[in-house]
Image (cartoon, rainbow, N blue to C red):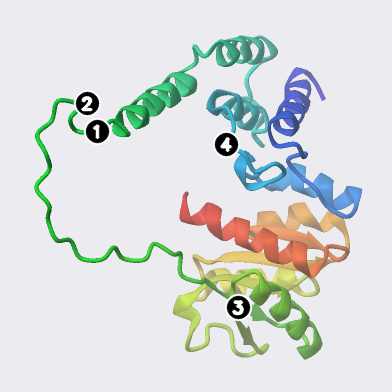
Amino acid sequence: MGPKTDVYALGVMLFELLAGVPPFMAEGPMEIMAQHMFVEPPRVKEVGLKREPHPGLEALARAALSKKVEERPSAAEFRARLTEALAGEDDASLLAASVTARLSNAVLTREERALPPRVPSVRPPAESTDQPKERVALWGFPSARVEALRSALSVNGLLVTAWAEDELGGPDAAEVRAVLIPGDGAEARIPSVRSHPTTKRRAIVVVDVKAVSSTPMLIRAGASDVALAQASDESIAVRVQKLLRSRRHA
């Protein structure tokens, strides 16, 4: 507890003002606490009102919500950056204003910009920019749990592979971007995933964790994210999506 904890609280409030929802939401207080401790907040435009935020204010909120205390601004720095952002004098706001000006200029006709007429040309059809579906693997789950998770993950646009206990790194392992493992026995499974040649760099999500007190140990062991037993399968699927998205843009 201390001044940097107060700054974190200000970051939570600022995020909610921008997005209309808190940065972290879950079914129980223990899972929310675990998210505050170990999970990066989503982008403002991805949650709640899903609107494009003020760039300087979002940057300030994310800085205040940093997991590393030393990376958060001081209270004085927070106030100064907030004042600058509201006045449009911060770097992020100036950059956004520059982009807006360029976009506004882009809608002028060539005559209005004193440019010669463009000679028509034949161009090939644009390639699709749709993001291909990503594959995740379920390893070590009983069949009934596999089907429940497969359903939730598939509905959220993910391809799902199920590996039996002795099938880590199957023939499609090269396509897998995340490995989901059950909370029971996770301490032994995480090192196996991290040491396997085709999965060692993949995200690891531990689900159905019974005690929130296990979360720090699992994260230190190499888990990328942890979902407690009371988390719904839908919320697990959404968290896997966000994790994969953040790794794509990292």
Residue 14, given in percent of the width and then of the height, sits at: 72, 26
Local crowd size for mark 4, using a 10 Å CA cut-off: few (<14), some (14–19), many (≥20): few
Q: Quadrant of residue 238?
A: bottom right
Looking at the rendered structure, the kind of residue marked 3 is: Ala
Mark before the other along the chain sequence, 3 or 1: 1
Kindly indicate whether the residue at mark 3 contacts the one at mark 4 (C-beta within 8 angstroms): no
Q: Secondary structure at mark 2?
A: loop
- Residue situated in front as seen by the camera: 10 or 109: 109
Which residue is disc 3 drawn over?
A: 137
Which dot, 2 or 4, sits closer to the camera? 2
Q: Which mark is residue 44?
A: none
Q: CA distance from mark 3 to mark 2?
A: 55 Å
Looking at the rendered structure, the kind of residue marked 4 is: Glu
Mark before the other along the chain sequence, 3 or 2: 2
Kindly indicate whether the residue at mark 2 contacts the one at mark 1 (C-beta within 8 angstroms): yes
Looking at the rendered structure, the kind of residue marked 1 is: Thr
Kindly indicate whether the residue at mark 4 contacts the one at mark 1 (C-beta within 8 angstroms): no
Q: CA distance from mark 4 to mark 3?
A: 33 Å
Judged left or right of residue 118, residue 35 is right
Q: Quadrant of residue 180?
A: bottom right
Looking at the rendered structure, the kind of residue marked 2 is: Glu
Which residue is disc 2 drawn over?
A: 112
Q: Quadrant of residue 138?
A: bottom right
Residue at 56 percent of width and 68 percent of height? 194
For residue 250, above or below residue 54: below
Q: Secondary structure at mark 4?
A: loop
Q: CA distance from mark 2 to mark 4?
A: 30 Å
- Residue situated in front as seen by the camera: 228 or 61: 61
Mark before the other along the chain sequence, 2 or 4: 4
Q: Which mark is residue 52?
A: 4
Q: CA distance from mark 3 to mark 1?
A: 51 Å
